[in-house]
Amino acid sequence: MPKISLCMIVKNEEKHIARCLDSVAELVEEIVIVDTGSTDRTVEIVSNYTSKVYSYPWKDDFSDARNYSFSKASMDYCMWMDADDVLEEAEKDKFLQLKQSLSQDIDIVMMQYHTSFDEAGKPCFSYFRERWIRNCDKYRWIGAVHEVIPPNGKVIYSDIAICHKKIGTGDPDRNLKIYRKMITDGKLLEPRQQYYYGRELYYHKQYQEAVSVLEQFLDSEEGWIENKIEACSICAKCYYQMGQEQSALTTLLRSMSFDMPRAEVCCEIGKHFLEHGNYHNAIYWYETATNTPKNGCNGGFLQPDCYDYVPFLQLCVCYDRLGEQQKAKEYNEKAGACKPYSQAYLYNKQYFDSL
């Protein structure tokens, strides 16, 4: 059975760190903590879990710090978590079973990463991340921000999930500052960094600059397909904010030049037509979303609700506005089957019951 080193980089995480370590400490053979300058009780707390606590200067480079943490690991695999991550109780048996059954030739284990949740705590935004990585020089992090280990060797996908559950807010400007500094220092952003830089600009409502960066990324022959598709979606959001609705729609449709339609994009196109009163076109795109296969293993961001709940709810709206109440009611029931606790579903149900 392989042994695992949990490798973490932390700074001022006294609110989160014990919860994280309590969730996983008994499942790993070693815990490595790299502190990048805490001024709270973080170091004191983690010292109760491990003696392998190291101080390392922060250099505005997440890969640099993570690689340092990996360099201190001594077990077969390195596993990373952020301080505000949790391995839920329901996942622990699967975690142990995977350790017991893991083939010796596996280099990387991908696990689900749930980062957003609905009112019932059900994941509504997920994607796969490299989580167990063979401990050798072949596997190292790259990227100052949104760091990644390029997939190589034998990779498997597990249904084990890590949940990202932040308490409070961090520094919303941190990532943008790092990108700005890289550019000021004359560093050329590679395609993946261009995508994430454009995304940060969108988050900061700098829509025109975000469009410029994202369009440059989209026009490049380089770049990962999933980033290209997501870039179309973000770019469209910028165009909507700037009042350029036709450009937004064109950009959403452009995403299909990179690969098969994604349900997430289909729902955005459906929303465009719904808001313009073109219900038949909206129905087409929402129905397309419900017939789109869900492929979490492609590595892209996955919004599960876009494959059933959201399009069902919007189809209910479309058919109601077309005067087809029975069909509208049927789609609302389909939405309710996905989320019986949904306030939108319950409101619609009350509406249909009153007719």
Image (cartoon, rainbow, N blue to C red):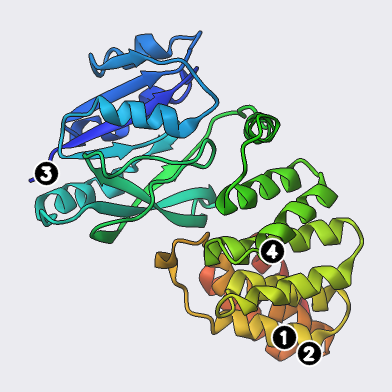
Q: Residue furthest right?
A: 243
Where the C terminus falls, by quadrant? Answer: bottom right
Question: Is residue 83 visible to us here?
Answer: no
Three-letter code, disc 2: His
Residue to which mark 3 is pinned = 2
> Spatial distance from mark 4 to mark 2, Cα to Cα?
22 Å
Residue 93 point in image, percent of width and height: 20, 49
* N-term mark: 4 or 1: 4
Residue to which mark 1 is pinned = 283
* N-term mark: 2 or 3: 3
Does 14 sit above or below residue 223? above
Residue to which mark 2 is pinned = 280
Q: Please, what secondary structure does the residue beneath circle 3 have?
A: loop
Given this view, does label 4 or label 2 mark the residue nearer the observer? 4
Number of other residues with Cα within 10 Å of mark 1, as a class: few under 14, some 14 to 19, many 20 or more: many
Three-letter code, disc 1: Ile
Q: Please, what secondary structure does the residue beneath circle 1 have?
A: helix
Does 271 sit above or below residue 211? below
Q: Residue at x 54, y 38 (%)?
A: 145
* N-term mark: 4 or 2: 4
* N-term mark: 4 or 3: 3
